[in-house]
Image: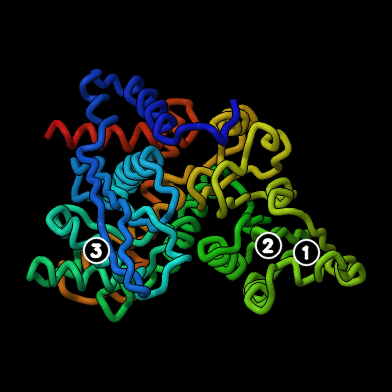
Amino acid sequence: MNTSTVNPFQSYLERLHKAATVLGLTASDEQRLATPDRVLEKDISITRDDGSTETMRAYRVQFNNARGPYKGGIRFHPAADLDEVKSLAAAMAIKCAVVDIPLGGGKGGVQFDPKTHSKQEVERVARAFVRAFANDLGRDKDVPAPDVYTNSEIMAWMVEEYEKATGTKDLAMITGKPLDKGGILGRDTATAQGGVYAMEYMTHVLDMAAKLRVAVQGFGNAGATMARILHADGHTIVGLSDSKGSIMSEKGFDPTHVQQIKESSDTIVDMYCKGMVCDEEKMERDGVTVGSNTDLLEVDCDVLVPAALDHQLTVENAPRIKAKLIIELANGPTTPEADALFFERGITVLPDVLANAGGVTVSYFEWLQNREERTWSAEEVQEKLKPIMTVATKSVWEKSQALQMPMRDAAFVLGVERIAKALTN
């Protein structure tokens, strides 16, 4: 099968069916978990800077709220695919259940390309979205957050527009806001920090060495932050990559220095190469190999952290992966066929639905902070994040051992079990 053509929602349904079979759910219970509560779609219009009117499709999928208000991002993207959004909304419900926070799953967006619009036009889109769905949002109904091509500033516009539209003050209706607009300390590092806490539990139960060789694919916020945290903890970062290429060395890299190179040039590879010309003497001195983004995946390491795009670990490269533990900081980096091969080879995969749940967990903390009308300290955020991620990882690991299945399947079983229980209460 060509994994690039896999329907993401169909993949969710297949995982759901497997979990429902293990749990002995009825057909009606499974159908309830396979069907979004509501798919909201509306046309919104804005006036562009040149005075013309543009109409675009806006949507919000509210998948399941058995355990709490719908929770999930809003994306601004020209290729809005409802199947993908449904699968992401469903995954959010599972993810929140796996880490046992009282939220459900949702996702939404607007079909347009923000890169071809001015900042003022993007703001008009954000405000129009909130006006269109104001009656369907709120701290106890549906709590959005940033996603693809949206950010904290856009969330600030949205909460302001919501308060105008409803005549209420409700910072808890959206998360991912700027600090001065009710945002929370530690949100920018939450996904990576949650992944580190999950990794710490797994390396302990797998009896791995105290200091490990780690490779991180993807040098965006999550990947770079995780690399910095692990380096500070004494682990050796033997490989790093961005979309332009990778650098690999048994001697390791300082991610902070690599970040400085990245910010001052086009790619991390510029540490050793300018275009096609590489500094062979410097590479030999540092024991460095330069390769492609995907070459990084096959480097000799103990822990591999895919933190870039989906479908990176495939049936083609899975036999050559040397890591003993894979931490999925990205969404969907492993294809089903690769998953099966890793299980056969005894390679443990910490699935995205657990590994990158630090982000939504700290979003939950922001929601609580706003409801409580107080400000959490950075220390309080970390103190509360670590046990949630550790307990969730322990629960998924123990279920995978009891059922003799990969951790991804075990995470789905655990999430589905908790949602199904909430539906019957």
Q: In what quadrant of the picture does the C terminus appear?
A: top left
The answer to whether residue 100 is seen in the rendering is no
Label 3: which secondary element: helix
- Pick the residue in front: 340 or 203: 340
> Mark 2 is on which residue type?
Thr
Lower sequence index among marks 1 and 2: 2
Say which residue label 3 marks.
Answer: 128
Identity of the residue drawn at 71% across and 33% down: 319
In the rendered image, which residue does mark 1 sit on? 251
373 up-or-down from 97: above or below: below
Q: Earlier in the sequence, mark 2 or mark 3?
A: 3
Q: Is mark 1 on a helix, strand or loop?
A: loop
Specify whether 69 is left or right of 333: left
- Tell me residue 362's x, y (percent): 33, 62
152 on left or right of 343: left
Amino acid type assigned to the residue bearing label 1 in the image: Lys
Tell me which residue sits at (65%, 58%) in the image: 243
Residue 140 placed where, x, y %? 14, 55
Point out which mark residue 198 bears: none
| Residue 60 place in picture, x, y as percent | 27, 49
- The label on residue 236 is 2
Q: Is residue 99 left or right of residue 273?
A: left
Per the model, the C-alpha gap separating discs 2 and 3 is 48 Å
Q: Residues within 10 Å of mark 1 (few under 14, many from 20)?
A: few
